[in-house]
Amino acid sequence: MENLIIAGLRIDHDVLSDSYVEWIPALRSLDELEFGSPVVFLTGENGSGKSTLLEAIAVACGFSAEGGSRNYRFSTYDDCSNLADALVLYRKQTIPQCSFFLRAESFFTMATQARDYDQGRSAMSALHEMSHGEGFLEIMLSRNAPGLYLMDEPESALSAGRQLALLAHMRRLAGQGAQFIVATHAPILLGLPGAQILQFDDDGVLSCNYEDTDAYRITASFIHHRDLLLHHLFADEEQ
């Protein structure tokens, strides 16, 4: 697509010859990815490599591995893989200044840095005074310009209602030229119309339909067949 900031990527596996990344099946078999939508979701089980790839994309784009804008320069613990060194990004546009990398696991540290950098100029200074979910959502809702937005498991901080608010905001911004790459397990977010969904599993990284994602199938099964599913789940306890 012509309006994308990053149209895809390629991995140079020679750079990763001694890296734990090569032990992750989905990433070991991945040579190249093309992005076909302004919103790309990376989904799959824990440990499938989606957050590792998202982090590498962020670092290759000039973000701190712990999140923030590209102006944020901080690190509290370096456990970043060397996958970023092996990435070749297919960039079609300059990354806009408004771009942001938001990840759930380092939100507290990033909020502290935001307070120091912002110095009272906006709500970014008061993220610690908000609940985790309110602060998380405030960061994204305050982004109103087309940029590159990377998010790692945003649903971990958000209620179902707040996920819907984020979904609507993503759709608006994507319509204005923003690009999102999001690692998520959330069936609500994955339901965004027109998004490209990339499923990470032992067979690799493959595009799939919403209804074929593990997140949708398991959630739908629980909602529609809860009693039966729980019966099988707790079968050992009933013997």
Image (tube, rainbow, N blue to C red):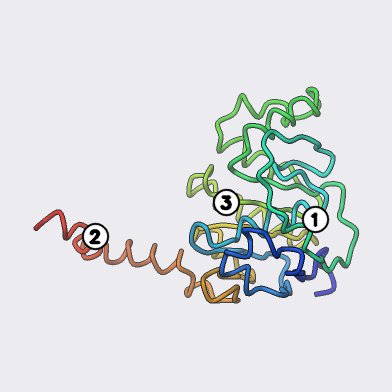
Q: Residue 239's mark?
A: none
Q: Amino acid at mark 1?
A: Ala
Horizontal relation, residue 81 to residue 231: left or right: right
Q: Which mark is residue 60?
A: 1
Q: Are marks 2 and 1 in contact (CB under 8 Å)?
A: no
Query: Mark 1 or mark 3: which comes first in sequence?
Result: 1
95 is higher (above) or lower (below) than 126: below
Q: Position of residue 59 (x, y in %)?
A: 77, 51
Q: Amino acid at mark 3?
A: Glu
Question: How many residues crowd mark 3 within 10 Å: few (<14), some (14–19), many (20+)?
Answer: many
Decide: is 68 above or below 95. Answer: above
Q: Nearer the viewer, residue 41 or 173?
A: 41
**Residue 48 x, y percent position in the rendering:** 54, 62
Q: Nearer the viewer, residue 160 or 228?
A: 228
In the current view of this chain or complex, which residue is farthest to the front?
Answer: 18
Name above or below for residue 142 compared with residue 113: below
Q: Quadrant of residue 31?
A: bottom right
Residue 93 vertical position relative to residue 157 in the rendered view, above or below: below
Residue at the outermost left position: 239
Report helix, strand or loop for mark 3: loop
- Badge 2 element: helix
Q: Which residue is mark 2?
A: 233
Residue at the spot x=60%, y=60% of the render?
Answer: 50
* Residue at the far right in the pictured view: 94
The residue wearing badge 3 is: 153
